[in-house]
Image (spheres, helix red, strand yellow):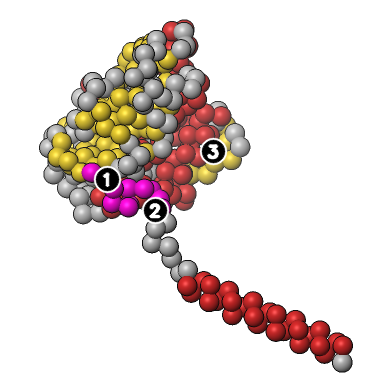
Amino acid sequence: MPPEAVLVSHHFEALGTGCSLFVVGRPRDSLVGAELWVRRLGARFTRFASDSELSHLNARAGEWVDVTGEMEELLREGLRAHEMSAGLVNIAVLPSMLAVGYSRPLVQGPGVATLHAVESLPRLSDVLEVHAGQARLERGAGIDLGGIAKGWMADRLCESLGPNAVANIGGDLRAVGPGPRGEGWPVGVGGRTLLLRDQGSATSSTRRRRWGDMHHLIDPRSGMPARSGLEEVSVVASTGFEAEVVAKTALLLGPEFAPAYCAAHAMAWWLGGAA
Amino acid sequence: MRVFLLKAAATVLTLGATVASALYVTAHLKNPAAPLQPPVLAGNGSTVGALGGQLTVGPSVHQSDVEPLTSTYAS
């Protein structure tokens, strides 16, 4: 076994969750710069701050709004996720989130639920248009990027951290290169250690961010928190973004269809618990 | 006469190519040994019980006994 290369790690809290960065053969400064990038984008992508870029877009539904390059790219990825998942991953989920009471960070307690307002989500392409530097939401629509932003950020970080690195943003991660020992990056998935190399992993769950009978993972077909028969799904795929999309889609499909779906779209998967 | 021969030759050549192609395609309708994408569909994946669920690992991912540096988790 080759000697272990010098591994540098950096851990921090951002986006309301824990983040970890690992790199081989690069200075720690690059990891601190990456943390600042995460914080900067997190401040623009959050729906909980009224002055964020996302809140600005949501508040001006019905108008064309100028967006930054990162926001444009993430919105396009949202459209791609919608296509990949046959509509099960839908970033236009904000109205349902608000209706079930997820109107502020849960550390502040849930908001008031208005379940009579809950309805199935529209097709994303019917309510979101993206042009170069601009985006437009239909009136009444709203975006929440929490479902895809972390995996996307992990992928972007790994592009900047060099050829041998891991970026883990709240459990959505990307691993590139051979790792510190040359056999892949050891990553925990479903209680086991898997060696990932140029792959991503993500977990979708109804076990976290719960309040009462509610949780944050909305099924677009009903507009209500998902009750598919699965509680948690972890996936290994080509990228962190794809892993996030596949994990959420599998969880929403439930135990009957998730195994076949994962077999077609993932490299490894863990299906956990009956809801 | 020369024009007729050229037309006849072209027709025979075309029909021959069509028949040969059809025979070839029929004989090679599918190759059972062709690799499937993703490779896990080939049935090489292993499934084990883990943490109250089922973990399936395809052949493109290797397991290890070492402690993980980091993990995927719900947040």
* Most distant residue in the bottom direction: B1
Question: Mark 3 = which residue?
Answer: A135
Question: Mark 1 = which residue?
Answer: B45
Question: Mark 2 = which residue?
Answer: B36
| Mark 1 Cα shell of 10 Å, populated few (<14), some (14-19), many (≥20) | some
Q: Amino acid at mark 2?
A: Leu
Q: Is A71 placed left or right of B46 in the picture?
A: right
**x then y, percent, for residue A86:** 38, 52
* Most distant residue in the front direction: A1
**x then y, percent, for residue A154:** 41, 26
- Which is in the foreground here, disc 1 or disc 3? 1
Which quadrant, please, contains the N terminus of chain A?
Answer: top left
C-alpha separation, residue under disc 1 versus residue under disc 2: 13 Å
- Residue range (magenta): B35-46
- Vertical comparison of A54 with A23: above or below: below
Who is closer to the viewer here, A223 or A163? A163
Who is closer to the viewer here, B6 or A30? B6
- Vertical comparison of B31 with A178: above or below: below
| Same chain? Circles 1 and 3 | no
Residue under the image location 55 percent in, 76 percent down:
B22
Residue under the image location 42 percent in, 43 percent down:
A81
| Same chain? Circles 3 and 2 | no
Q: Are marks 1 and 2 in contact (CB under 8 Å)?
A: no
Q: Amino acid at mark 3?
A: Ala
The chain containing the residue under callout 2 comes to B
